[in-house]
Image (cartoon, grey):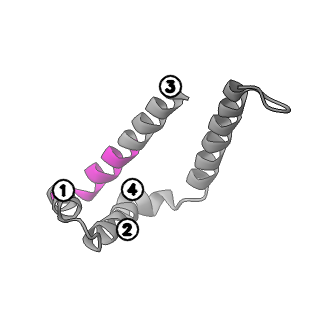
Amino acid sequence: MQTIWLSGAEWLAVLRTGLGLWWLESWRHKDKKGWFERGTGIAWAADVAGRHRWTFVKGGFEIHDRAGQEQNAMTALISLVALLGAIGLFL
């Protein structure tokens, strides 16, 4: 695919770079102490999952939420990094 300025692969590279920079900037502004020590990120996710209309989302998060808050935060962070890495490989 050829566009005016960039090819299709070049546009995907630009989008991938922009997504990575957006994620890094959002991570920079997070309250990391609250995220890891008080579990604010997991609390937010639990609230969203608790209001979800699909029961398997609620049930899946309740099973996951039984572990300690610190373990949940690290699991979520490692999962997010792995997911972004996998997405990056395909883009």
Given residues 34 and 12, the one toward you in this image is 12
Q: Which corner quadrant holds the N terminus?
A: top right
Which mark lies nearer to you, 4 or 3?
A: 3
32 lies above or below 90: below
Q: Is residue 73 magenta?
A: yes
Q: The residue under label 4 is which amino acid type?
A: Phe
Q: Quadrant of residue 80?
A: top left
- Amino acid found under the numbered disc labelled 3: Leu
Q: Residue 36 carries which label?
A: 4
- Residue 21: percent from left, percent from top: 66, 43
Q: Which mark is residue 89?
A: 3
Magenta-highlighted residues: 66-77
Judge from the rendering whether residue 42 lies leftward or rightward of residue 10; answer left or right: left
Query: Which numbered marker is on residue 44?
Result: 2
- Mark 4 vs mark 2, foreground winner is 2
Dots 4, 2 in contact, CB < 8 A: no
